Amino acid sequence: MVNAIKIPFLDLITPHTELQEQLIARFKEALQTACFVGGSAVEDFERDFADYCQASHCAGVGSGTDALRFALIAAGVAPGSIVVTVPNTFIATSEAITQAGAVPYFVDVDERTYNMNPENLREFLETECITTDHCTIHRITGAPVAAVVPVHLYGQMADMDPILEMAERFNFMVIEDACQAHGAQYFSHNQARWRTAGSMGKAAAFSFYPGKNLGACGEAGAVTTNDPELATKIRMLRDHGQSSKYFHDIEGYNGRLDSIQAGILRIKLARLTEWNTKRRANAVRYSDLLSTQTAIIKAPYEPSWSRAVYHLYVVQVEARDRTQQQLAAAGIGTGIHYPIPLHLQKAYLGLGSRAGVFPVAEAAARRILSLPMYPELTGEQQQRVVEGLVNAVNQASVDQLSLARSS
Ligand SMILES: *Cc1c(COP(=O)(O)O)cnc(C)c1O
């Protein structure tokens, strides 16, 4: 084989090798002080991460899923209400909605950005719901639309201006799923300035799962918000509803961010701007390399109002599964985010949806392929990925043709 050296989909070894001494020092400090839960390490990280997101508050929690669930509950999403999101996301988005007691509704996405299409949201609110002075309720069930969760998928922010305008007009809250978008930016024409993911909604959820742009060495997450009361509620929810030790004002959860992870995240946060810059540069390089292949490979689209942080670099190809197999055989790792839209998952058969209801998300799910993307990826590796991809796409279409002929 020509290219014997593999190109992994993700490289979690290099950044940790580089930071090894600092990370070990943090771990030793935790052992020496035995401060494993809470304390200044958590508070220091929370302050730094709030600043990074240009939000006034941050509460560290156990995972991105905790962050979403606590944000919805703390924002006041009542049991039985509707929370609208998109079908092409990780299931944690809708799990959190259900676990907050609400019912997930989906609206289809924009075919170029893969993010919530505001027009589809508007159509849902105008045709399937009725708006009174105080709220918007579903015509058939009568359930109120409490919140909308736009997902900043692949590291690119959803089109927030129209969604926030609708939030005013239809009386719902916006909770950002920023689990893939640490540091992503959006130019708000309404506010005439760039805004950072995590600063625009009522609250935002972040995940620090190891593979995210900012990843812990284990599980972790955070909620950011500009609302001090909401931040206080999240701090109670993550800690068994305690307002102070053994005073439980409400029932909560065990969903804290531990001190070792907080310390590790703070060390890594100092590198995040540099890492995101490298990811953006890698995205530009991929897109340049792909610019002559637009007939067979669709590259990601970044609107002028977006500065994406490329958690994933996702292309579309025709014979995706065969292409992926070919690439794997050539030693190039890829992923699919996500192969089955949520409304078609077994877990959601009960919601009564069916194939064909969200055509954009469904078509994308058949064609999307995530290429290797991380700060350490080199230009030479990217060239090999694109060469491998072009070969694989061509080979896959030949294979499919002969398969069709022989059957
Ligand atoms: C990773 C992720 C989550 C969940 O985060 P965890 O930390 O794994 O709980 C939620 N939503 C999206 C879009 C994600 O990518």
Image (spheres, rainbow, N blue to C red):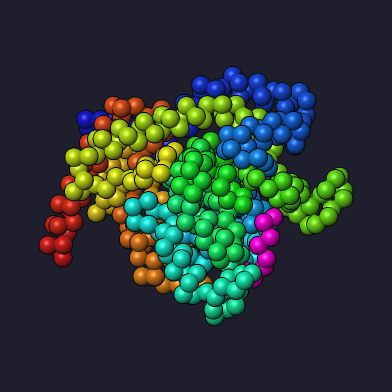
- Return the residue nearer the eye: 374 or 156: 156
Pinpoint residue 113: horizontal percent, then vertical percent.
37, 51
At horizontal 41% and vertical 29% (from top left) the residue drawn is 278
Left or right: 93, with 154 as reference point = right
Report the span colored magenta.
74-81
At horizontal 64% and vertical 57% (from top left) the residue drawn is 72
**Residue furthest to the right:** 246
At horizontal 57% and vertical 60% (from top left) the residue drawn is 168
On the rendered image, what quadrant is the N terminus found in?
top left
Pinpoint residue 189: horizontal percent, then vertical percent.
45, 47
Res. 274 in view:
yes
On the rendered image, what quadrant is the C terminus found in?
bottom left
Left or right: 209, with 162 as reference point = right
At horizontal 15% and vertical 52% (from top left) the residue drawn is 398
Left or right: 265, with 228 as reference point = left
Pinpoint residue 142: horizontal percent, then vertical percent.
60, 78
Pinpoint residue 2: horizontal percent, then vertical percent.
21, 30
Quadrant housing residue 167: bottom right
